Amino acid sequence: MNAGRSFREYVDLLKAENEIVEVTKEVDWRYEMSAVTRRVYDLHAPAPLFSNIKDCTPGVRVLGAPMGLSCDEKHPLKRLALSLGLPADLSGPAMVDAWSKLADMEPVPLRIVEHGPCKENRFFGEEIDLTRLPVPLIHEGDGGRYINTYGIMIARTPDGSWTNWAITRAMLDGPQTIAGVVIPTQDFGKIYSQWKELGKDMPFALCLGVDPAITMVAGYPLPTGMNEGEMLGAWYGEPVEVVKCETTDLLVPASTEIVIEGFASVDTLIQEGPMGEYGGYVWAGRHKQVPCFRVTAMTCRNHPIMPLCVAGVPTEENHTNWGVNIAAAIRHALSKTDLPVKECYIPMECAAHWVVVTVDRNRRTQDDDQLALEIGKAVFASRGGSYIPKVIVLDDDIDPSDLNQLIWAVATRHHPDRRITMQNQYMFPLVAYLSQEEKAASVSTRVIYNCLTPFCRWPEALRPVEASFRGYPEELKKHVIDNWKAYGF
């Protein structure tokens, strides 16, 4: 792997690739820093590195849009590829396919080291004031300042058999308290429930500014019980280095920029939310009671860098990181079937509400409706598919990452009568369009859009030919491309 093994190295790599703009002008953590980052997403501009943030501890920096779409128009997923040590020119579906192999790799145990960069500065008790960190107020309507938008939360089962690294949002509550979101169906929530059954507060560590491959593996829907750190070691081919926390026995990545550690209460609840979410909306007035995370220590590097994801309308890290991760998990699950699947991809523009699955045009099956149903069922039964409400099944002449091709194919190939609905299904409660009742119950309808064509079985004289540049003979296409400038363009 060629990925930087620390967030600091990743920042340097982005600088070398002209993927960063250093913002030295003073910005306010109240909306301004996030507004700049949102505009960066919209323009596919370089990631902003803020070094002068109003009313915050001097020297602490923030990198906005760490894994937003690249300013390199030919390689929009360049930051994602660099984070995984993959070629920068890799296509989205090819990246999904490569990353889908992760779950079959042999775990590599962590390497515990005595010291790490994250220990350069240490703070305890009343010395800690999280409100002095450049924690953003992101959207109008948000319930508070969100300290975790793109870091990882670490928790371990009481018996020590399983450690989970997860990306889960967390809202600042006070100088030493955080409102932590705990979703019972997610791994982090499953571990919390074990501590709650024992009546013991759960040790946690919030790591801000980690090796970007760590945030990728933390967003991967691995099977319950798998340790993300060990699986990343498998991807690297060598152990991930970790160091022990100051006030708990948890192990954290040694190169982390900022480590915030403590205990999540199993008794005390505090208010959290609302927050602008990956579906693109701030649900005004929607808040809930969540566990209080009490902070007992904070360690950090000199001049640390915090990551900032401004969740909302695509495309931001929920759609690049999570989209690729969910698609990879689905691709892995489908690879274990005998279905004629070619590619899986979650288009960035769909806010992780669709997955597109392409199948072999030369398939032997004669019943496309049954094939689409089997694919949809396999997707929904998978760990990754548990987050996805809609499946689009297409022939493999369509590039699922090309939005122009995708819109054309869905519009012209999907017959309304071939839409397959599956009612009373589990539904991830953050899916945007759900009613209040559906969100509370996590139950709704899922759908499969069968866009497969029967053209390959028609008499050859009647088969339609795509009326586009792609439809011309390869020799003619090459001739036109080679002579493009000679034509005067």
Image (tube, grey):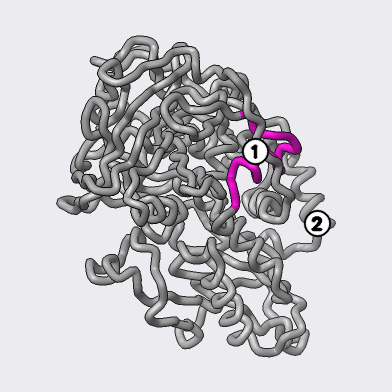
105 or 436, nearer to the observer: 105
Describe the element under mark 2 as helix, strand or loop. Answer: helix
**Residue found 71% across the figure and 37% down from its top:** 236
Q: Is residue 387 above or below residue 252?
A: below
Q: Amino acid at mark 2?
A: Leu
Which picture quadrant has residue 367? Answer: bottom right
At a point 55% along the width and 30% down the height, the residue shown is 253
Which quadrant would residue 131 be assigned to in this image?
Answer: top left
Picture quadrant where residue 115 is located: top right
Toward the left, the furthest residue is 285
- Residue at the disc numbered 1: 84
Q: Earlier in the sequence, mark 1 or mark 2?
A: 1
Q: Which residue is mark 2?
A: 476
Callout 1 environment at 10 Å: few (<14), some (14 to 19), or many (20+)? many
Asked whether residue 227 is drawn in magenta, I would say yes
Near-viewer residue (72 or 449): 449
Q: How many marks?
A: 2
